[in-house]
Each structure stands twice: as structure tokens, then as C-alpha cells.
Amino acid sequence: MLNVRLSDDTEKELARYCLDEGISKSAVVKEALEAYLIQCRKVKSAFEAGADLFGQEGSGSKDGSVSYKKKLKEKLHAKHAH
């Protein structure tokens, strides 16, 4: 058993919807909760959501966080090689 407190406005809107559709408040709440829980399972982690954006800005290189030391050494060597 679950009791849920709704604001007066939400309660009125739910009652109006149920009357228009000819369904019970319980049926609407059950369906909405099921849809919410399904959506929650589909949510990606922050990394998954932005994976296509990481490591590419500016340089276009996708391995910048891994190869930055090597690239830095190459740039310093080139600068001071003459």
C-alpha cells in the first residue's frame, strides 16, 4: 500500500484527467510510476552521455588525455632543438 500526498493543483488536474479518460487515479499513478522507473533504468552515466564530446575539442585528437606527455616532450624538443 502506498499513500501519496499531492498538491491541490495536481490533485485537481489528476481528477479532471481521470474523469475525462474514464480511468482511476490509481491506474494513472501506476502507469506513470512504471514509465518513470523504465526511464530511470535507461539513464546513462555522465561519461556515457558525453562520450562523443570528450577529448576532441580543439585538437581533434581523441587520445589527448593519454598521449599529452609524449606530445609535450615532442614540442619542447622541437622548440629547443636548434
Image (spheres, rainbow, N blue to C red):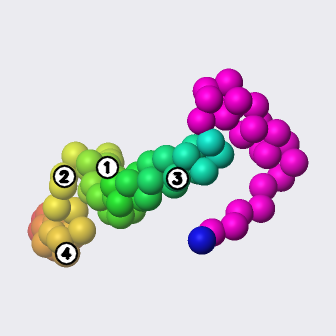
Q: Are marks 1 and 2 in contact (CB under 8 Å)?
A: no
Q: Residues within 10 Å of mark 4 (few under 14, many from 20)?
A: few
| Residue type, numbered disc 2 | Ser
The dot on residue 53 is: 1
Whole-percent x and y of residue 37? 44, 58
Numbered disc 1: secondary structure: loop
Q: Earlier in the sequence, mark 4 or mark 2?
A: 2
Disc 4 to disc 2, how far (Cα)? Answer: 14 Å
| Residue type, numbered disc 1 | Leu
Disc 2 to disc 3, how far (Cα)? Answer: 48 Å
Q: Is residue 20 magenta?
A: yes
Disc 1 to disc 2, how far (Cα)? Answer: 11 Å
Q: Are marks 4 and 3 in contact (CB under 8 Å)?
A: no
Whole-percent x and y of residue 62? 18, 55
Disc 3 to disc 1, how far (Cα)? Answer: 37 Å
Reading the image, the residue beneath label 2 is 61
Reading the image, the residue beneath label 4 is 69
Q: Which residue ends up furthest to the right in the rendered image?
A: 8
Image quarter in which the C terminus is found: bottom left
* Residue 80 seen in the figure: no
Numbered disc 3: secondary structure: helix
User: Mark 1 against mark 2, which lies toward the viewer?
Assistant: 1
Reading the image, the residue beneath label 3 is 30
* Residue 41 seen in the figure: yes
Disc 4 to disc 1, how far (Cα)? Answer: 21 Å
Q: Is residue 1 above or below residue 50?
A: below
Magenta-drawn segment: 2-23
